[in-house]
Amino acid sequence: MVEKSEVAVAKCQYYSLNDVQSAVKTCMDALGGLQSYINPGDTVLLKPNLLQAKPPEEYITTHPVLVEAVINLVRDAGGIPQVGDSPGAFDRGLEKYWNITGLSDVCGRLDVELVNFETAGSYRKTRNGRDYHIAKPVLDADLVINLPKIKTHSLTTFTCAIKNLYGTVPGFTKVEYHKQSPQPSQFAERVVDIFAVNQPCLHIVDGVVGMEGSGPSSGDPRKLGMILAGEDGVALDSFITHKLGRNPLEVPTNRIAYEQGLGEVDIDKINIIGVAPVIDNFKWPPKLSSTLEMIPGPLARGLMKFWWVRPAIDSEKCNQCLKCQGSCPTHALKKSGTLTKDQRAYIPEFDYEKCINCLCCMEMCPQKAIYHDQSLIYRLISKFSDS
């Protein structure tokens, strides 16, 4: 276990710089002050969530006001801040991401370097017999401050401190890991490996407005009203999922990280400093159910043809940008599908023989046009098992 399973939390209702910076400082003071983590002259890499090139008001990415607040506090502690991430989309136009998400404005005004993980090179790290490529600026920094956003995730159930470090892997390698580990538990093991090789970190969480439902990009904004911080990312994720009404061990990344001794999930063993707001009726994503494990093997194999949950495209929302095709690690989206009404472009179609249900397409769709389609037998069995 990490030595310090403490979670600091401060209420924060608005994305004003004064409010956010005050909340971050409150959290950090409770943990001994940011100066206890930073020596004068240290390079401090801030790693936000830049999943898509979307403006802050869509609440898909870490809000730039949090980034600005942490930059100010890092400088006050004598550190030299940098900002970097590797978004998940297939196009590598990072300037577009920085501009639209508001980070170009923040870093330009404050004269802070925006680090390009795609061109900076990587180091190879090995864990559990698997090799991972981690961007050099991440491992070269004296301290990494992880700046995740509280969101649901249709594959891993939840994304915050643990999952956000997946973005330290540059380029298309992230998609390849999806391909190699298609099942939720397999992919969660990869995510935990990458989390582990990036330790130690300090985590400061954007929980002012999060996302519920079919996250991490197609869900609905949900005001949560808090900023959180801690060294133990597992404890942070576990406390947050607990506050949102779910057993932390039901989130595969929490469970696997705990089993590997990377942090604490028992809420009674986590020292909570501060008071989090009450959050009722938080909406979680549809379950990628394990109900088939309850069914005898021969019958389960026969049902597999008719028992499925898989991505599908809403033709009314699709604008034929084809980002789903570019993000698919198995090339499961056909280039010729349903002709649109204007007869000028095609809506892609899935080849479900190739689809591994990694949901990269859902993450990358800017129109929220990809949804979970469920077979009738799946809906019936899931309804029975959840009753």
Image: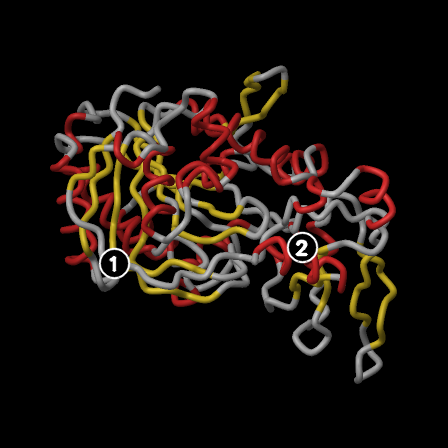
Question: Does 78 sit above or below residue 308?
Answer: above
Question: In the figure, residue 239 lies in which quadrant?
Answer: top left
Q: Secondary structure at mark 1?
A: loop
Real-space Cα separation, disc 2 to disc 1, in angstroms: 33 Å
Residue 278 circle label? 1
Question: In the figure, residue 338 lies in which quadrant?
Answer: bottom right
State if disc 1 and disc 2 touch (CB < 8 Å).
no
Question: Does 307 sit above or below residue 273?
Answer: below
Tell me which amino acid carries mark 2: Cys
- Relative to 85, is 27 on the left or the right? left
Q: Nearer the viewer, residue 186 or 221?
A: 186
Q: Which percent across, then down, holds residue 268?
A: 26, 34
Q: Nearer the viewer, mark 2 or mark 1?
A: 1
Badge 2 or badge 1: first in the primary sequence: 1
Q: Which percent across, then down, holds residue 88?
A: 58, 47
Q: Nearer the viewer, residue 227 or 135?
A: 227
What residue appears at the point 70 percent right and 62 percent down from the top-left corner?
380
Colour scheme in use: secondary structure
Can I make out residue 96 in this image?
A: no
Read off the residue under disc 2: 361
Can I make out residue 251 in this image?
A: yes
Please identify the quadrant where the C terminus is shown: bottom right
Q: Secondary structure at mark 2?
A: helix
Q: Which percent across, then down, holds residue 341?
A: 80, 84
Tell me which amino acid carries mark 1: Val
Please identify the quadrant where the N terminus is shown: top left
